[in-house]
Image (cartoon, rainbow, N blue to C red):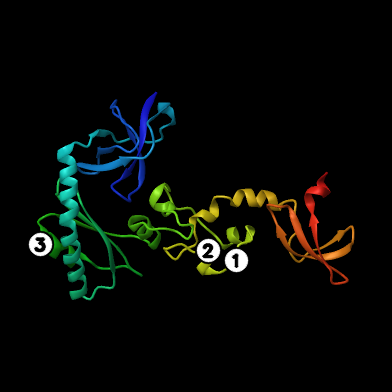
Amino acid sequence: MIEIVQVRLREGGKILYYNTNNLRLEAGMCVIIEADKGLDYGKIIFEPEVVLESDIKESLRKVIRPANKRDMEQIKENKERIIHIFKACEKKIVERKMNMKLVNAEYSLDNSKIVFYFTAEGRVDFRELVKELASMFKARIELKQIGVRDEAKMLGGCGVCGRPLCCAQFLKDFSSITIRMARDQGLPLNPAKISGLCGRLMCCLEYEHSHYKELCKNLPRPGRTIKTKQGKGKVISINPLAQTALVVLEDGRQIEEDFKKNEK
């Protein structure tokens, strides 16, 4: 058995499992964790859980310790410093007329590395920019190109539902979202209505899609001609939740056919 905990890296990073390292940890706690090179920080989003070691498919990094006062001061200081570094990098991008949009920048906990995140329509040759930034800030520089969905996750915001973006709160990975999901749920196929802040189809379209697919199995497809107690008619639309279909009869009348009753 092994005790693990889910940690969101920094403020809007990935959610990963870590070995608790036999430490007493709680949800909401800021912790120092093992990183690629050195240490990083994150926030515990759920209470620790105990699982079988055989269920762990890959080696887990460890939580080093709960963040102490000095760690929190360092994190705060880095956030203040990175604001000026971000602006300086933006200025260099403009001066070099590079076709890229700077999204965010992060300092490593020990100040040895600075990571810049950007979006761009294609590949960008940023080698000379990296050299100049390394000379300016005396640190190892990394530039990472991200997608628009990653940008929304990193920057956060509120969706049309009025709640914080799912990607910035709890989603671990981005699923493939299709227009079929919106169609199966009877949503208007208007990009403005079914797209998120990132401009892509909303991730929440996936949440109930499997349930809607199951409900639709008992309903006729729109456009199909069916027999009703009042005669033949063509299905105009369906309501999966109510298990009904709107049907226009041959004489022009419209009726609502209840398929729950038909099942009994």
For the residues marked 2 and 1, what is the alpha-carbon distance in whole angstroms? 8 Å
Q: Are marks 2 and 1 in contact (CB under 8 Å)?
A: yes
Residue pictured at 29% horizontal, 27% vertical: 24
Q: Report the number of numbered marks.
A: 3
Residue 154 on image: x %, y %: 33, 56
Secondary structure at numbered mark 2? helix
Q: Which numbered disc flags the more N-terminal residue, 3 or 2?
A: 3
Local crowd at mark 3 within 10 Å, few (<14), some, or many (≥20)? few
State left or right for residue 46 relative to residue 87. right
Q: Quadrant of the N terminus?
A: top left
Mark toward the viewer: 3 or 1: 1
Q: Which numbered disc flags the more N-terminal residue, 2 or 1?
A: 1
Looking at the picture, which amino acid does disc 3 mark? Met
Q: Which numbered disc flags the more N-terminal residue, 3 or 1?
A: 3
Identify residue for label 1. Answer: 188
Identify residue for label 2. Answer: 194
For the residues marked 3 and 1, what is the alpha-carbon distance in whole angstroms? 51 Å
Secondary structure at numbered mark 1? loop
Residue pictured at 25% horizontal, 42% vertical: 41
Q: Is residue 181 above or below residue 251?
A: above
